[in-house]
Image: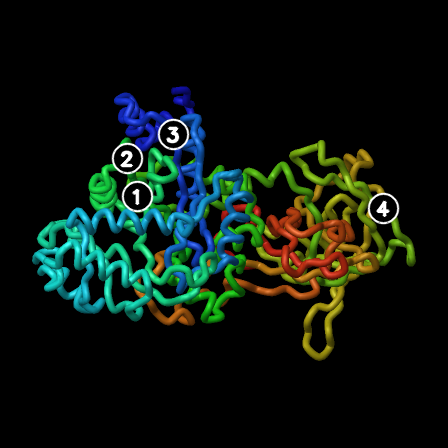
Amino acid sequence: MEHDKERTADSFLYKQICKELEEEPFGRSMCTRFPPEPNGYLHIGSAYAIHTNYTMAQRFGGTFHLRFDDTNPLKEDIAYVKAIIEDIKWLGYDPGEYIYYGSDYSERIYEAAVALIRKGKAYVCDLTPEEVAGYRGTLTEPGKNSPYRNRTPEENLELFINMKKGAFPSSSKVLRAKIDMASPNMNLRDPVIYRIIHAEHYRTGGEWCIYPMYDFAHPIQDAIEGITYSLCSIEFKDHRPLYDWVLQELEIPEPPRQREFGRLSLTGVVTSKRFLRQLVEGGYVDGWDDPRLPTIQGLRRRGFTPESIRGFIEEIGSIRTQSTVDISMLEHSLRQHLKAETTSVMVVLKPLKVVIVNYPEGGTELLSIENNSENDALGKREVPFSRVLYIEREDFLEQPVKGYHRLSPGAEVRLKGAYFIKCEEAVKDPATGEITELRCTYDPQTKSGSGFTGRKVKGTIHWVSAEHAVKADVYLYDKLLLEQDVPEEEGDWMELINPDSRVAVADALAEPAVLGARAEDKLQFFRHGYFCADRKSSTRERPVFNRIVPLKDGWGKRL
């Protein structure tokens, strides 16, 4: 079988599969799958699982399936299905025609359950959910047999058929596998494999009122689709014996194999679906696509690119256990992708007015400024320059400290792509003492690109022409949580969330070039970082930008 040994030489999972395939256990091509429940949105951890399954199929010349595990009508919605398909395609892991739904296999999964009943390997149990949990035992104590465990196959089959017909209320009965209540593996202590749920299913409506549990449906669905390897995150390792038991008892030829890899977490990032739902439904964030969330929708809205996410996952490689990776690695991958691909523009977030007193009143000129200092192919743009400008308020200090190389009284700096200017006077509000305006002079001989070789200055600052400035809304993002470690239990989110995780800057002033930015376009704001035009709210008339990352690793730093 042809596969790329060089790309995967360091993957423990790849080596394990290679060794197993030497025995030729399958008479079919490699086939993997990603089986999301359509009850929420994908996140960065999901992307790692998708990548593992997708690339393993590709490296062995096989196919990759997307299969929705839609066996719980109480939580599922078509909106999640559409979002998951969109996210997977956007990430670059398009399954093409191989999109499936667990609900399409309802009849065959039901038939499998009937087969187990007839073999005496499954029984209908009337214990309540609380009683089932109580009978299960603990990690150090064996469980107790259900009083309904010894029902005959005939009695169990009749009860199960009536469960399917809707003769019993929700949760009043379950179908359990008959395995071993004394097993050291809690998953083998007669697990529930079917339950009664009287609710409308988003695809099958009211056709069914009994639904299989994931651990039972999963191996059957894999077998139906011809999956060879079910690659799961590490928390499913203890479920593997049940996966194998189901396939063995159903006498599936050349059964698929479950193998596990490590689960990915990021520092300071919530990936628990339960916690994410609390944040969204509690109004702590702006929906599932809030740019502070690690959902694929949120990362995309923030401005992360598919290439940067894939590059980040490739850099991590194949992990064996639960691993927490510093989020700066993801940011680094994004910077590496954007630094030579984006146009740099000038945007002033906290404006301070500058009047160049010796520049002609009413005069305007267009200056040619490079779009990217690392990529000449991006060319240049024309930026309007005039007598009245705005600079960043932090680029002026009345009493400069040692090492400060920006503007101060009597000091000279270069305006990016323009001229040297010198501060002659700082005008203050007589009531507050706040500096409201700088009066400067410029040296017309120092124009950028003019070949000027005279005196040097240490500082270069950005600016925007007041007459031509475009107003924009800018959002500066920091980590969502105050602590690097995500809480393991529920807590008061108001105490856990960083109050500066999103800072809005209204009426930032930008050069006219930003008007050409369409939704999701990326720009580098000179000295401020990489920004993305918001896909939900940005318009040509009123641009809205989200900061993706600062130019350097400044996680937690503020402007």
Q: Are marks 2 and 1 in contact (CB under 8 Å)?
A: yes
Residue 30 got which mark?
3
Q: Is residue 402 visible?
A: no
Instruction: Name the residue tied to disc 4.
Output: 366
Which numbered disc flags the more N-terminal residue, 4 or 1?
1
Number of labelled discs?
Answer: 4
Instruction: Decide which of 372, 440 is in the foreground and name it.
Output: 372
Q: Position of residue 432 (x, y in %)?
A: 68, 77
Q: Are marks 3 and 4 in contact (CB under 8 Å)?
A: no
Which numbered disc flags the more N-terminal residue, 3 or 4?
3
- For the residues labelled 2 and 1, the Cα–Cα distance comes to 9 Å
Q: Quadrant of the C terminus?
A: bottom right
Q: Position of residue 298 (x, y in %)?
A: 52, 55
Which numbered disc flags the more N-terminal residue, 2 or 3?
3
Left or right of 374? Residue 190 is left
Which numbered disc flags the more N-terminal residue, 2 or 1?
1
Q: Are marks 2 and 3 in contact (CB under 8 Å)?
A: no
Check disc 4: other Cα within 10 Å, few if <14, some if 14-19, many if 20+.
few
Find numbered disc 1 in the image and state the secondary structure of the residue it sits on. helix
Instruction: Name the residue tied to disc 1.
Output: 219
Q: Is residue 470 visible?
A: yes
